[in-house]
Amino acid sequence: MDFEPFQYMRFAKRLEYADGIFMAGSGMYRPKADLLKFKESDFTLESLCSNYGDPRNVAWLAEHYATSGENVALTAGSSEANFLVFAALLHAGDKVIVESPGYPQFSSLASLVGAEVVKLPRRFEDGFQPDLDEFKKLLDDSVRLVVLTNLHNPSMARMSPEVMREIAAAAAEVGAKVLVDEVYLDHLRPGEGDESALKAGENVVVTSSLTKVYGLSGLRFGWAVGPKKLVSKMLDLADVVDPELSTVAQNMAHRALENLSRLRPVARRLHERNWPVVKEWLESREDVEYYHPPGGITVWMKVNGVEETGNLATVARQDYGVLVVPGEYFQSPGWLRVGYKIEPTSVREGLSRLGKAIDDFKSH
């Protein structure tokens, strides 16, 4: 089967075990166990039901999104949720509108089913907000799916509910669904623009997980919430590729969901603690432009005078011991995504090394 490899994921998996100051990640570190209040019974193999996930988790998410359990599909992370949406909706020859810069998984997923990717620009000069007129011009009867991230990956820009509703309404006119990956959304303060896009239209499906904000990537606990017919087809596909979810992971995820109000502030405090350190360094560099994120633990920056950052990232890693993500993985040569989930002293040291790597690279 021919498809577009997910090269960023191969890069990220290898980089995580490389030596150096790790500023390439976009997910939180693992929380302390006492925050989750695990019980001995959470680690047993007995469960209410593990075929489609623990019904306690379905019920929790249904209440959280103010919908019914028939609208919820539990998955092995948001990556599987996104895959199931693509596979359930698209056929060869269909068009899928994907934001750019954007998470490269979406183009790889489109290639798996032979769909055509149509790029929707999200530009720095527009605060990485999609242009609605430009979006509407991309729509035609061949478009079956529109894919967005909120917060936007890689910039962490927040999209307003008003813009989301307009996008959903325009997509509905041509019979297209809108997938909104909300895996970073809970980096925002509660009540400050963190409303899910689910209510933007009946054609909207949202995906998320306990990974990026909550640091529980090892559980592989994700979900999709959307129209009942779509969710039912996603479960049909899950029967083929993922017949049973991990009982222990579901038990632990249930405990995490019960304690999200304790976990979420940890990520927010990390952003508020480290962002001033990052901003100070950014402002000290005349050759760097950046987007000020409303939350999260990464910054998206442009290095002026550098047309390609793949080699720059290699110099930073090999010669200066700091690990960052080149913008080429997000269709953006000349940009870097830099994470700051580490301790402030390490953030300062890592940025200092990155600055030296940039100076060295540009001098040659």
Image (cartoon, rainbow, N blue to C red):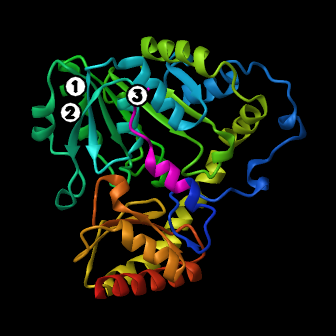
* Furthest-front residue in this view: 1
**Kind of residue sitting beneath label 1:** Ala
2 drawn magenta: yes
Label ID, residue 171? 1
Based on the picture, tell me whether residue 143 belongs to the magenta stretch: no
Distance, label 1 to label 2, CA atoms, is: 9 Å
Seen in the picture, residue 196 relative to 121 is either above or below; the reply is above
**Residue 39 x/y as whole percent:** 86, 41
Whichever of callouts 1 and 2 sits on the residue coming sooner in the sequence is: 2
Residue 114, given in percent of the width and then of the height, sits at: 33, 24
* Image depth: mark 1 or mark 2 in front: 1
Residue ID for mark 3: 112
Looking at the image, which residue is at 69% across and 39% down? Answer: 258
Q: Give me the residue at 58% from left, 83% from top.
A: 345
Residue interval drawn in magenta: 1-12
Question: Which quadrant holds residue 143?
Answer: top left
Does residue 116 appear to the left or right of 340 in the view shown?
left
Looking at the rendered structure, the secondary structure element under dot 1 is: helix
Disc on the earlier residue, 3 or 1 = 3
| Residue at the disc numbered 2 | 166
